[in-house]
Amino acid sequence: MQIMPLAGRRAMLFLAPLNAAMAEFGIDTPLRQAAFLAQVGHESGQLRYVRELASGAAYEGRADLGNVIAGDGVRFKGRGLLQVTGRANYAACGVSLGLDLLAAPQLLEQTIFACRSAGWFWQSRGLNRLADAGDQERVTRRINGGVNGLAERLVIFAAARKVLT
């Protein structure tokens, strides 16, 4: 609650799965955890959303996301706490987590898989290294493709640093 006050009661639902995901994916120092929680906090609206609010139509035909079949944009819109997006990312995440996400993309909306997919995404993008360097801007760029929401991410990061140290 001190890190993501807008989470409300959802904070308790996510606490154990988030801790388990951080342990599973090597997000194992206070600096890494603060960086991870800052990104999760922004991308999920402080644990309020595990599915992107937009329709996903903007991702239609995006070959860079592996969306090569009509309907992929909507079907594989952002899900999970870090908003895994696109057929290719769902396929890779599914292999890592042992889930058939191509057949059931909505699994990433379940609390445990929302957390584990975030841990997978973090690890698969080498974000511990950037977190260790304290480079929140580069972490944000790797997650978001730009610096959208950087100010909020930095506020959550500062709150997490206080709580975790």
Image: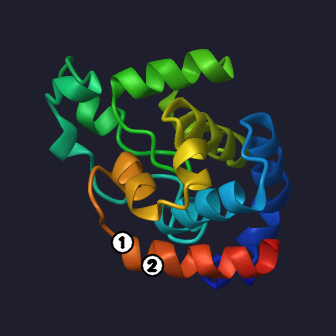
Name the quadrant containing residue 6: bottom right
Specify whether 162 is left or right of 66. Answer: right
* Mark 1 Cα-neighbour bin, 10 Å: few <14, some 14–19, many ≥20: few
**Residue 152: assigned label:** 2
Q: Position of residue 130 (x, y in %)?
A: 52, 49
Residue drawn at 74 percent across, 38 percent down: 26
* Mark 2 Cα-neighbour bin, 10 Å: few <14, some 14–19, many ≥20: some
**35 to 77, vertically: above or below:** below
Residue drawn at 34 percent across, 53 percent down: 141
Name the quadrant containing residue 94: top right
Q: Pick out the residue farthest to the front.
A: 133
Amino acid type, mark 1:
Gly
Disc 2 to disc 1: CB gap under 8 Å: yes
Q: Secondary structure at mark 1?
A: loop
Q: Position of residue 122 (x, y in %)?
A: 56, 41
**122 to 134, vertically: above or below:** above
Res 71 seen here: no
Residue drawn at 21 percent across, 27 percent down: 64
Quarter of the N terminus within the rendering: bottom right
Mark 1 lies on residue: 149
Residue drawn at 48 percent across, 35 percent down: 125
